[in-house]
Amino acid sequence: MALEHAAPGEKIYLGPLESALSGAKTSALVRTDRFELIRLVLEAASTIPTHSVGGYVSLHCIEGSVVIEAGESIRLRPSDWVCLARKEPHSLKAMEDSSLLLTIYFD
C-alpha cells in the first residue's frame, strides 16, 4: 500500500504530539520532485546509524531531544533547527521520545 501524502493546499498539524508521541510512527507528509517532508518519530535511546542523503537535510526538533553526529555533536531540543549539506554523513540518537520535522531538498 502506498503512503498517502498531503495534497497542495491541505493543512497538516506539525505541533507537538504530547501524550500521543508514545506509540506514534514516522510518517511521510509530502513528496515532490524538489523536496520530501517527513515527521520523524524516535523512541528514547533509539538510533539511526550513520548514513548520507543526496539532498540537503533540514531537521527541526518539535519535541524531545536528539543528538546528531555530523562531524561534531549537535544536540537539538524543541524549536532547534539544523541544516546538513548534501551527502554529509550523519547519525541520530534520541535522548528521549522525540519528534522532528525532516525535510530533504533535492537538486
Image: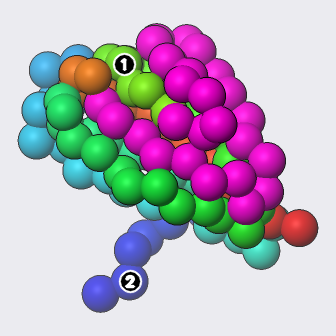
Classify 18 as above or below 6: above
Identify the residue at horizontal 46%, vertical 13% (top origin): 77
Residue at 52% over, 36% down: 69
Q: Position of residue 87 (x, y in %)?
A: 73, 61
Q: Quadrant of residue 79?
A: top right
Q: Position of residue 25 (x, y in %)?
A: 24, 50
Query: Dot 2 corresponds to which residue?
Result: 2
What residue is disc 1 on? Answer: 65
Amino acid tagged 2? Ala
18 sits left or right of 53 in the view: left
The answer to whether residue 3 is seen in the rendering is: yes
| Residue 9 makes an appearance in the image | no
Q: Amino acid at mark 1?
A: Ser
Relative to 101, residue 35 above or below: below
Q: Which residues are magenta?
A: 69-94
- Position of 35 with respect to 21 (left or right) is right
Residue 95 magenta: no
Residue extending farthest to the right is: 107
Q: CA distance from mark 1 to mark 2?
A: 30 Å
At 29% across and 87% down in the image, what residue appears? 1
Disc ID at residue 28: none
Q: Badge 2: few (under 14), some or many (20 or more) residues near its Cα, within 10 Å?
A: few
**Front residue of this view, candidates 6 and 64:** 64
**Pointer 1 with pointer 2, Cβ within 8 A:** no
**In the image, residue 33 above or below residue 13:** below
Could you say which quadrant of the image residue 13 lies in?
top left
Coloration of the structure image: rainbow
Residue 27, percent from left and from top: 37, 56
Residue 51 point in image, percent of width and height: 52, 61
